[in-house]
Image: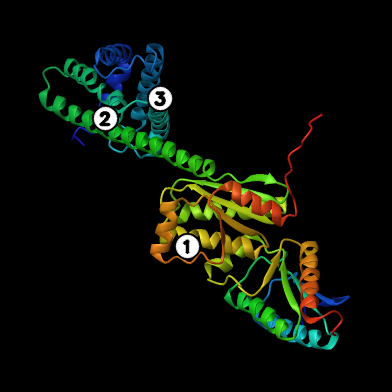
């Protein structure tokens, strides 16, 4: 780094820790990016104090402060990613999250200026060390924030997938699978698996696939549907497809999709009636309810 | 040599596949089963594959072949207890076994065979054979 060897930043920070902390917190509280609605001041203070502590500890072991991936920075990085993740969940923007680090620059530089007054070469060198360290930490924060957001998105996708494929037992031996939303390959796989699993669990002989909530049926979707029907048949269950809207019936015929081997009905009620008949069940109206 | 046992129960033959099938075993089963149908004059074959976890296109085709062969020998075939993963695999392989009857378990498979037999007798006249 510099010819005289190690940087003296860590010493200076630890010497003036309380001043620096106070300045930094004042800086953060004054900033326009402060989100008092999402986070309490006491929490901010606590986070700043702990983070500064961690920096001092890491800096005392790595005088050059040039590699934040080194093991001595482990704790700092963990703490920082915990902060970013929690802020991502709380609804902070990436900029607001990174500001937590960048707002430390001003107080830190002010301190360096006071400490190294008169030694401009030294001052420039230490400034460079400090700024590159804070930039790296800031970038790291943004990355961690991004990861936190991706986790949220991934979890939501998974939940949506599970929510959108319920298999309902309509009657003993009769299952219904109301499909809502577009069918793609990944979803068909989930649909197929959950239907077949439920067939095994309940020993149902008839499954009604209701596509009232499927907005469009193209050749791929039709193929996916037929695959599901074939797989259920291989296991010994018959499928009925219901909820085919007029436009979809037109599309299916125009596309030349062959649904001849599958029983299709326009409404779930019709399909249920067929299923009941096949199970040798009837519904009768009770004339004189007692 | 490894063989899959074929049990005779009344007019039906029962085959329970409890090991993973390899090609030679499948061929042996095909031979044994066609011979067995001819010898016992069985009217139906029930193949239980509930313990079968792995299928490939060969085994899938063999199941279809067995069904077609036994139909030629005047016996219905029912495949029972297929696992979801196996069903998905067969469909993805493009083998939906159109000529094979299927049932969820042995019990339903047996009643399906009896039903098929009753239908046959209605068509052919009772007690023809």
> Are labels 3 and 1 on one chain?
yes
The local secondary structure at tag 3 comes to helix
Q: In front of the other: label 2 or label 3?
A: 3
Residue A92 on image: x %, y %: 34, 25
Q: Quadrant of the C terminus of chain A?
A: top right
Q: Chain of mark 3?
A: A
**Which residue was labeled with disc 3?**
A90
Residue at x-position 34% and y-position 14%: A36
Confirm or deny contact between disc 3 and disc 1 (CB under 8 A): no
The mark nearer the N terminus, 2 or 3, is: 3
Mark 3: few, some, or many residues within 10 Å (few <14, many ≥20)?
few
Q: Is residue A72 visible?
A: no
**Which residue was labeled with disc 1?**
A223
Q: Is residue A72 above or below residue A102?
A: below
Residue A116 on image: x %, y %: 17, 19
Q: In front of the other: label 2 or label 1?
A: 1
Residue A193 on image: x %, y %: 58, 54
* Foreground of the two, B15 or A239: A239
The mark nearer the N terminus, 2 or 1, is: 2
The local secondary structure at tag 1 comes to helix
Q: Quadrant of residue A21?
A: top left
Residue B117 on image: x %, y %: 79, 74
**Which residue was labeled with disc 2?**
A134
Q: Is residue A269 above or below residue A66?
A: below
Q: Is residue B32 visible?
A: yes
């Amino acid at each position: 780094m510099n010819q005289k060897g190690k940087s003296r930043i860590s010493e200076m920070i630890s010497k003036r820790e309380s001043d620096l902390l106070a300045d930094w917190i004042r800086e953060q509280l004054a900033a326009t990016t402060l989100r008092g609605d999402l986070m309490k001041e006491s929490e901010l203070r606590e986070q700043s104090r702990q983070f500064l502590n961690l920096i001092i500890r890491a800096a005392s072991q790595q005088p050059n402060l040039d590699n934040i991936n080194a093991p001595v920075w482990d704790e700092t990085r963990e703490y920082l990613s915990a902060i970013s993740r929690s802020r991502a969940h709380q609804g902070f923007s990436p900029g607001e999250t990174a500001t937590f680090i960048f707002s430390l620059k001003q107080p830190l530089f002010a301190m360096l200026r006071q400490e190294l007054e008169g030694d401009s070469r030294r001052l420039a060198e230490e400034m460079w060390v400090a700024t590159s360290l804070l930039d790296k930490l800031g970038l790291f924060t943004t990355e961690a924030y991004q990861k936190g957001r991706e986790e949220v998105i991934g979890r939501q996708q998974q939940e949506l997938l599970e929510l959108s494929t319920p298999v309902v037992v309509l009657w003993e031996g009769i299952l219904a699978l109301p499909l809502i939303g577009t069918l793609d390959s990944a979803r068909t796989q989930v649909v197929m698996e959950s239907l077949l699993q439920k067939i095994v669990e309940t020993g149902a002989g008839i499954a009604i696939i209701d596509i009232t909530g499927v907005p469009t049926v193209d050749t791929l979707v039709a193929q996916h549907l037929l695959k599901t029907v074939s797989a259920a048949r291989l296991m010994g269950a018959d499928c009925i497809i219901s909820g085919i809207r007029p436009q979809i019936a037109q599309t299916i015929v125009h596309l030349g999709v062959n649904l001849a081997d599958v029983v299709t009905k326009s409404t779930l009620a019709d399909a249920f009636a067929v299923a009941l008949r096949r199970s040798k069940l009837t519904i009768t109206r009770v004339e004189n309810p007692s | 040599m490894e063989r899959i046992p074929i049990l005779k129960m009344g007019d039906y033959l029962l085959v329970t596949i409890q090991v993973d099938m390899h090609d030679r075993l499948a061929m042996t089963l095909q031979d044994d089963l066609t011979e067995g149908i001819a010898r016992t004059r069985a009217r139906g074959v029930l193949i239980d594959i509930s313990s079968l976890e792995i299928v490939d296109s060969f085994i899938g085709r063999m199941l279809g072949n067995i069904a077609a062969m036994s139909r030629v020998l005047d016996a219905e075939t029912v495949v029972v207890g297929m696992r979801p993963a196996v069903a998905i695999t067969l469909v993805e392989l493009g083998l939906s076994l159109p000529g094979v009857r299927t049932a969820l378990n042995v019990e339903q498979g047996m009643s399906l065979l009896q039903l098929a037999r009753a239908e046959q007798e209605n068509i052919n006249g009772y007690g023809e054979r």
